[in-house]
Image (spheres, grey):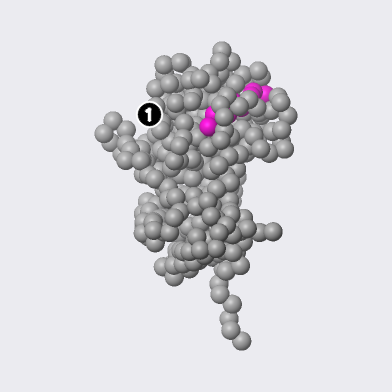
Amino acid sequence: MIASIPSIPVARPALGEQEAEAVRRVIHSGWVTQGPEVAAFEDEFAAFVGATHACAVSNCTTALHLALKAVGVAAGDEVITVSHSFIATANAIRYCDALPVFVDIEAGGYNIDPNLIEGAITPRTKAILCVHQLGMPCDLRAIVEIGKRRSIPIIEDAACATGSEILWNGQWEKIGKPHGDIACFSFHPRKVITTGDGGMLTTSSPEWDRKFRLWRQHGMSVADTARHGSKQVIFEDYEELGYNYRMTDLQAAIGREQLRRLPGLVRERRQLVGAYCAQLSSIGLSLPIEPKWARSNWQSFCVGLPFELDQRAVMQMLLDQGISSRRGIMNIHLEKAYSSHNSHRAATLLDRSVSAQEETIILPLYSGMTDIELLRVTEALRQHCAEAIKDGPLLIS
């Protein structure tokens, strides 16, 4: 019997014995919820990105919610962002009873078009929420300048961008320094580093950081660590509405190990993307472009298909060969949850956003991906492109 060919996932978390040992250490410590490991992870993450403050939370969606709340987004306000993003970007705005205002993405990329932002601003605009999509930094300098000129806070949805860099005043700096007002990160398993799930907020504002820490723990006036470590009895107070948005020490211990490995993981992903581009440059695909002022962590590798290829057909043919893929990034305004007239406002046409969803696919990319696996992906695409050009569009009936 011929052994089946191993499947190639679209992503795979880079977890090993170091992370397992870190979890074991926390279990034996007896403190598994938000505690000393979370505090250490926050300090180390802040130092890594160059931020004054870092606050760990349960995931990036909760981070976005707290960031929007901190800058004052409330009922009746508007927040300018993109539809071309995971739905959590807009959901966090609606958690504040505010309205997502969508503008289109840039030509030739997947990030917000800064040239469309000012035209979307109204007296109700309370924040601009930009997304570093797929790990590629957006044109943050242009966006920050708009924010300063119009006195509008800039929140970065950096869910995919841990380890990405931007050229800022002649120096390479990490996304999350932050260059806007608040940056929000995800540690979901699809991201370059993971804690199983989890998030982080970075900011230079001590007052916002204080609010994050208050709100993430039900509005409790005294942290668990302080209360349990005190030699005197302390009764906590709850002076305002808070949430259960805490990260556990189990997660943070994994995160600390992942953060130590992050530079190497990014180098590996950048090498894999270089190999992808070399293999795919001549077969008619549109390859992502990294601006001179950006260094992506390449959280995902997204390619545009030539008109001869049908997206679903290509993905199915790859899957038939044991190769997983994903369609291009979703458009929030096309989802049923955003179909009502009061769920969002489209400030511009969203044609480029829709095209990006329908005409691109995300290819496998992960730490430990072998040359053979990458060659299987590229050869499958090469063959299908050649067949499409010869026979016409490949469609699923």
Q: Residue at x 60, y 21 (%)?
A: 78
Q: Residue at x 37, y 51 (%)?
A: 263
Residue 2 is left or right of residue 141, and the answer is right
Instruction: In the displayed orientation, state which residue is furthest to the front.
Output: 391
Residue 326 shown in magenta: no
Q: Is residue 102 visible?
A: yes
Answer with left or right where residue 110 lies relative to residue 72: left
Residue drawn at 51 percent across, 56 percent down: 363
Q: Is residue 47 visible?
A: no
Residue found at the very far bottom of the displayed protein: 1
What residue does disc 1 label?
A: 141
x, y (%) of residue 201? 50, 35
On-image quarter of the C terminus: bottom right
Furthest residue in direction left, as rendered: 170
Magenta stretch, main secondary structure class: strand
Q: Position of residue 349 (x, y in %)?
A: 57, 29
Q: Is 358 left or right of 49, judged from the image as shown?
A: right
From what the image shows, is residue 378 above or below residue 129?
below
Give x and y (percent) for residue 25. 52, 56
Which percent across, then down, holds residue 337? 71, 36
Q: Nearer the viewer, residue 112 or 316?
A: 316
Q: Which residues are magenta?
A: 97-104
Question: Residue 99 lies in magenta, yes or no?
Answer: yes
Give the image quarter of residue 267: bottom left
Instruction: Identify the residue at image location x=43%, y=36%.
Output: 138
Q: Residues within 10 Å of mark 1 (few under 14, many from 20)?
A: some
Q: Amino acid at mark 1?
A: Arg
Give the total of numbered labels.
1
